[in-house]
Amino acid sequence: MTHTPLSPRTRARSRRALLCAALLALAVQTTVVAPALAEGPGGRGGSDCVRTEGRLDAKARTVLDITRKAKKDLRLNAVQVRVTVDGREVLTDALGESMTGVPAEPGMHFRAGSVAFAHISTALLRLVEERRVRLDDTVERWLPDLPKANRITLRMLASNTTGLHDYVTDPEFLTELEAHPFRAWTPEQLVAYPLRHSFWYEPGTSWSYSHANYVYLIEALEKITGVRIDRLVREKVTGPLELRNTQNNFTPDIPRPVLHAFTSDRGLYEESTFWNPSWTTGPGAVITTDICDLARSAQAIGSGELLSPRSYRTLINPGTVGLGGGTATCPATICLKQTEAAHFGLGVIVVNGWILQNPSFSGYAAIQAYLPSKRLAIAVSATKTATTPEGNQAEVVAERIAAALAPGDPLAIG
């Protein structure tokens, strides 16, 4: 899920905020990680994502100083950070604690939420390039139970222009989620909430964020290819990018080592590490990652490394610019105006030239952001203390780093 200026604050807000909104998670692995093997890829106990070694140069010291100050200012429990320029490491580090007495390390895994949507959309565009499907194909053959399926296209699902309501902002859903954070959700249970409502607008005529779009898109892609979504994304995206620590998890387990999360979403400060994330999207698309993979993902997705120039342009603006804005049937707080400076692409968010995703839910907050003009990638993951301000504070850390390294290109998300 993701909090952005382009989508409703989707950390489920019931009495507090309970989660995220610009989408959820995923990266993929062909098999479920059994707890006994949850030490890392291949069962390894160590990690290849480690702190920057040796003497830091001026740029690295600047990033580290900013991160240290932000951790203190925002009263964060832990912060993981990695910055690269043209793929070369500037700084990799982790500050604070995973749990009491357990220092945070860069190689610790965390939930990556809506980063999955950037990967799924890239996989979709690669299928389009292979001429296995067209972006403007309507989905009735794959999603016959979806209302208006003969008017909804794959492009609309991936760009949030269907008009479907978002279950993450449905009060009934939020009440159930808050009361039962360990509940396992099925796709049918999730989409039942938006299907209780009429569409905000006719498909393709406006923009509004809805997690239901990606639940449906995942189902469509699995039917189109005959391949489970975790395997498809591994084949098309995370495998070619060698994101070895990014994987789908079919259970609430997280591969070790784990960055633990804590939240006050339910009114008391409590551990939320293993709350069930199945509500965030369809099965096979609920991912965990580490900070090194997140930075690599930022660079690859943000540069269009796996795509043709035409597909990359579509990723950045699939026709959303100019859509949105309040109407008699959709308030401006839902149908957010999409502008050149700030808009939603296919599974990514574009802000002042930065291409990003910013998951935030159940005590986890992160951001992957890439500035093509400077080939600058910033990845931040953060966890909370009981006094951390509301909102995705990983964004704040990244904004401060961006202000120092790219002062002419503000990463102004909130």
Image: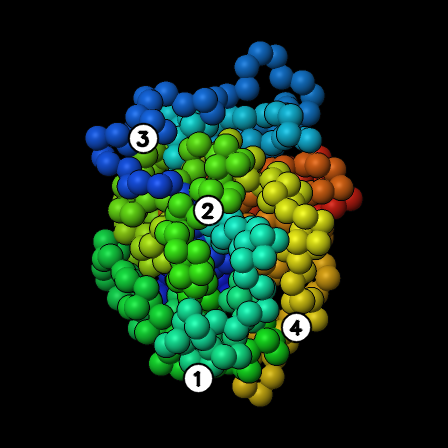
Q: Quadrant of residue 378?
A: top right
Foreground: disc 2 or disc 1: 2
Report the Cα–Cα distance between label 1 and label 4.
Answer: 19 Å
Report the Cα–Cα distance between label 2 and label 3.
Answer: 22 Å
Q: Amino acid at mark 2?
A: Val
Disc 2 target residue: 233
Q: Tell me if mark 2 has few (under 14), some (14-19) or many (20+) residues whose alpha carbon lies within 10 angstroms of its own.
A: many
For this rendering, which residue is in front, 139 or 395? 139
Disc 3 target residue: 256
Q: In which quadrant is the N terminus drawn?
A: bottom left
For this rendering, which residue is in front, 386 or 188? 188
Q: Earlier in the sequence, mark 2 or mark 4?
A: 2
Asked whether the beta carbons under mark 3 and mark 1 sit within 8 Å of each other, the answer is no
Asked whether the beta carbons under mark 2 and mark 4 sit within 8 Å of each other, the answer is no
Asked whether the beta carbons under mark 4 and mark 3 sit within 8 Å of each other, the answer is no
Report the Cα–Cα distance between label 2 and label 1.
Answer: 32 Å
248 left or right of 75 in image: left
For this rendering, which residue is in front, 17 or 151? 151
Q: Amino acid at mark 4?
A: Leu
Foreground: disc 2 or disc 4: 2
Q: Earlier in the sequence, mark 2 or mark 1?
A: 1
Q: Position of residue 317 (x, y in %)?
A: 67, 60
Label 4 element class: loop
Q: Position of residue 77 (x, y in %)?
A: 41, 37
Q: Tell me if mark 4 has few (under 14), some (14-19) or many (20+) residues whose alpha carbon lies within 10 angstroms of its own.
A: some
Q: Amino acid at mark 1?
A: Ser
Residue at position x 28%, y 51% in the image: 276
Disc 1 target residue: 198
